Amino acid sequence: MNMQLPLDGMPRRLYSCTPSRLNAWLDCRRRYRFSYLDRPQPSKGPAWAHNSVGASVHNALAGWWREPYERRTPLTAAILLTNGWITEGFRDAEQSGHWLGRARDLVSGYVATLDPSDDPVGVERTVATRTKVIALSGRIDRLDRRGDELVVVDYKTGRRPLTQDDARSSLALAVYAVAASTMMRTPCRSVELHHLPTGEIVEWRHTEESLARHLGRAEELATEASEADERYRTLVKPPAKGATTSRSGRGAAAPGASRPGPGTSAPGASRSGPGTSAPGERQFVGPTPVPDEIDELFAPSPGPICSWCDFRRHCPEGQAAAPDRRPWDALAE
């Protein structure tokens, strides 16, 4: 593969990224391409109910810490959750209401275990760090001060119980610790996962060596993704201004360009004909037509996780690898 290398003596441009972008590259390169390179971005599937629950809980907990001390009560947490409840992805209003009640219990029960006077260093705090390879940034759910050190806290609302390995192996938590330590000029080695459904706190304390390994891994992934990005930009011409890809994903392409295979439409896609939408519907956008080399460079990684991919409708391999899921199927009934 002919990758364009920087000229001798010329510094390589830093690869700007988040842990989410690096994990997307690691998990599935086709999903990475659809998320970060194809423009306009291919249409996503319907919203997931479990994501609505997670976002609602995170927003309520962030808002709780922003309240005056005297209002930091379990009742306030429940009110914030109710007022900010996201209803997307649920089967119907009854299911949404049921989960609203469960989520209220989650946040009110969790904040009852907290000391409202123990203000965090940051809530929904953006941190960043740089190396010779990457400019990495991301947002931490909560950053605590414990003694002379900082602790990265990440909220979890999924039904799967967590293990210490989840905290130890998390690339995101490790680089957040590095970034927080750099920005605050304070040691930060401990990371915590707070699992609200069980009330369990899973902690891992990194060493300087383990943090360096995670940062080195981030640089490796960034180098791979950066080179692939450059190849994409070299071979794929941006669409003409105002142009959109048709419902089937079959736009004009250069000779030899690959075409999205069968299964590019899905429930929720426009049924009014290629490239059109019914009143009130968004225009359906298919993947950008790309040459075979790019399709191979950004090959999919089919597996069970494909059931939950936002871009499943555009990926025949993903559809074949895992069954369809309803937007509320990940809820723990």
Image: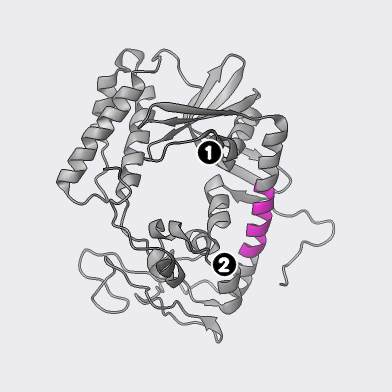
Say what amino acid the circle numbered 1 marks: Asp
- Looking at the image, can residue 53 be seen? yes
- Looking at the image, can residue 236 be seen? no
Q: At x 63% / y 58%, what residue is drawn?
A: 225
Query: Residue 226 colored magenta?
Result: yes
In the picture, the quarter occupied by the N terminus is bottom right
Magenta stretch: dominant secondary structure: helix
- Is 61 situated above or below 129? above
> Could you say where residue 318 lies in the image, as x and y percent from the top left?
44, 66
**How many labels sit on residues?**
2
Say what amino acid the circle numbered 2 marks: Phe
Q: Earlier in the sequence, mark 1 or mark 2?
A: 1
Q: At x 21% / y 52%, what residue is drawn?
A: 91
Query: Residue 87 colored magenta?
Result: no
- How far apart marks 1 and 2 lie (CA) works out to 27 Å
Q: Is residue 197 left or right of residue 187?
A: left
Instruction: Give the numbered dot on residue 166.
Output: 1
Q: Residue furthest right?
A: 8
Q: Is residue 184 left or right of residue 64?
A: right
Q: At x 56% / y 85%, what residue is drawn?
A: 256
Q: Which residues are magenta?
A: 218-229
Please state which of residues 66 and 201 is positioned toward the viewer in this rendering: 201
Q: Is residue 63 left or right of residue 186?
A: left
- Badge 1 crowding class, 10 Å Cα cut-off, few under 14, some 14 to 19, many 20 or more, is some
Judged from the image, the secondary structure of the residue bearing numbered disc 2 is loop
Q: Which residue is mark 2?
A: 298
Q: Do the residues bearing badges 1 and 2 touch, measured as CB atoms within 8 Å?
A: no
> Could you say where residue 86 lies in the image, as x and y percent from the top left?
27, 43
